[in-house]
Amino acid sequence: MATKKSEQGTFTLAAVLDLNEASNLKANLLSLRGKPLSIDASAVERVGAQCVQVLMSAAQTWEKDGKPFLISKASEAFKMTMQLIGVNVEHLLAKE
């Protein structure tokens, strides 16, 4: 299960982001709406299309709200899956 640290505006993604995790991910992200958010995807081992949709929807929501939404850390599995399914997250990745 994913964890959150709302006081810091960070959210750590679960290792497995599959259909079972999609509704939890949505609920957790919605609870953080309205503040800048940094996503830690460093532990992600597998990403399903449903969770990708939730993340992309969240990114658009934060953009409409005028709040930063960044992926501060991304595992190779996360980046590779995004590339394979054709989702460009380069603009969301924090510059290190």
Image: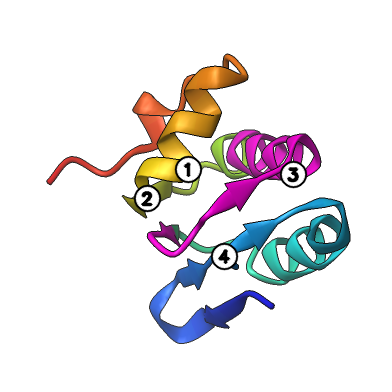
- Per the model, the C-alpha gap separating discs 1 and 2 is 5 Å
Q: Amino acid at mark 2?
A: Ser
Give the secondary structure at mark 4: loop
In the image: residue 56, left or right of residue 80:
right
Q: Nearer the viewer, residue 70 or 73?
A: 73
Label 1 to label 3: alpha-carbon separation: 14 Å
Decide which of tag 2 and tag 4 comes sooner along the chain: 4
Direction from residue 87 to residue 72 in the image, left or right: left
Which mark's residue is nearer the viewer, 1 or 3? 1
Q: Which mark is residue 41?
A: none
What secondary structure is found at the residue carrying circle 1? Answer: helix
Q: Which residues are magenta?
A: 39-61
Which residue is disc 2 drawn over?
75
Give the spatial CA distance, label 4 vs label 1. Answer: 10 Å
Mark 2 or 3, which is nearer the eye?
2
Nearest the eye: 51 or 15: 15
Location of mark 4 (residue): 15
Measured as percent of width and height from the top left, residue 57 is found at: 71, 37
* Quarter of the view holding residue 52: top right
The location of residue 24, given as percent across then percent down, is: 81, 68
Res 38 quadrant in image: bottom left
Q: Residue at x 58, y 44 (%)?
A: 62
Residue 54 covered by magenta stretch: yes
Foreground residue among 42 and 4: 42
Which comes sooner in the sequence, label 2 or label 3? Answer: 3
Disc 4 residue type (three-letter)? Ala
Q: Earlier in the sequence, mark 4 or mark 3?
A: 4
Q: Residues within 10 Å of mark 2 (few under 14, many from 20)?
A: some
The answer to whether residue 42 is visible is yes
Residue bearing mark 3 = 54
